[in-house]
Image (spheres, rainbow, N blue to C red):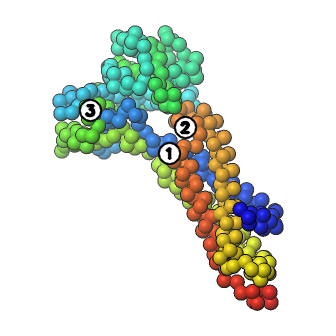
Amino acid sequence: MKYLHLILAQLLRSRTRTVLTLASVVVAFMLFGLLDSVRVAFNSGGTVEGANRLMVSSRLSITQDLPVRLAQQIEGVDGVEKVTYAMWFGGIYQDMRNFFPNFSVAPNYFDVYTELLVPPEQVAAFKNTRTAAAVGAALANKFGWKIGDTIPLQATIFPQNGSNDWPLQLTTIFHAKDPNDAQSEQQLVFNWKYFDESNDYIKNEVSWFTVVIDDASRASAVAQAIDALSANSDHETKTQTESAFQQSFAKQFADIGMIVTSIMGAVFFTLILLTGNTMAQAVRERVPELATMKTLGFSDGTVWGLVLVESIFLVALGGLIGMGLAALILPGMAAASGGMMPFQSVPPATWLLGTALIVLIGVGVGLLPALRARRLKIVDALAGR
């Protein structure tokens, strides 16, 4: 701390250069905080209550359907407690911009997804009403829906009787048990039997099965037994954890991890070049001053440390400001994401990675200038050589 005033004096030597470099660091880490939070959100699928759930889908692609008769066979596998199934529908409400996840489900859907809180009478209404729909509370609030309303869902894949109209009766509104699980309240489900009887294209097929097992530690063995049921058939399955399934589902739209890594790789590469050039230029301009410091008794190690700490301090200051701005912006992004972003702030994993990057970049851009300052010869420096 006793050398802090020297570090600040050197940073303020060229205020314009320092401010512009600091601004670059701030922007880089703000982008990192936002983008990495999105990556973590997409890669953190599954809930605590879903730790004992497996997802069964086609081995070829999640877009390939499976015969619904597999449900009875899966129920007979040792270790399986419950099985439900769903079929992706992909409908829209009024406008393409109003897209939200929607699919048809088996009657026991809410018996498996126990993290969704539903009044018993509404569960019964959902099971007993042919055209029943159940929606999350957040989605209902967004569109002003209430029990008894008719939701005119429009098909984009599966017409019925040549029409895209699928009128659904809202019988059920569910809430997420976990307040942070906002994504669960941004979906609509309706009866699979109604879908199966009414659509013009497919019959007796589903997109995936959800399997509840009695012991999460046996997940691998149960998954292998389930996949063995359809081995060497035209509908081979791939059974995986709920978290892995949700990640693969998200990757249908884009590989978020690869996109974030590519963008941030380019941003940080540019940042390293910019900050490294700033530090190198700052040391070149201060050669006579560094030589004077050595003449006054500052050791090579002290001069080396001052230059390195100056670099780390500049990157750390900009990085923390950038991450702080990301934390302020993220709640707005979460609100506008329609539940896809469950985080209301920068997640701890992003903070840890950001801190590591601050240290690595700070050391990386300051190491060579610091070594140059350490090796500086007093006579040569004062002679201008």
Helix, strand or loop at label 1? It is helix
Numbered tag placed on residue 213 in the rendering: 3
The CA span between labels 1 and 3 is 27 Å
Estimate the spatial distance between the alpha carbons at disc 2 and disc 1, rounded to whole Å: 9 Å
Could you tell me which secondary element the residue under label 2 belongs to?
loop
Q: Amino acid at mark 3?
A: Ile
**Residue type highlighted by circle 2:** Phe
Q: Amino acid at mark 1?
A: Val
Image x and y of residue 316, in percent: 66, 57
Q: Residue 232, relative to residue 84: is it above or below? A: below
Residue shown at the point (58%, 23%) measured from the top left:
142
Residue drawn at (18%, 33%) of the image: 77
363 sits left or right of 248 in the view: right
Residue topped by disc 1: 40
Give how far across and how far down residue 71 sits, in percent.
Answer: 24, 29
- What residue does disc 2 label? 343
Q: Which mark is residue 253?
A: none
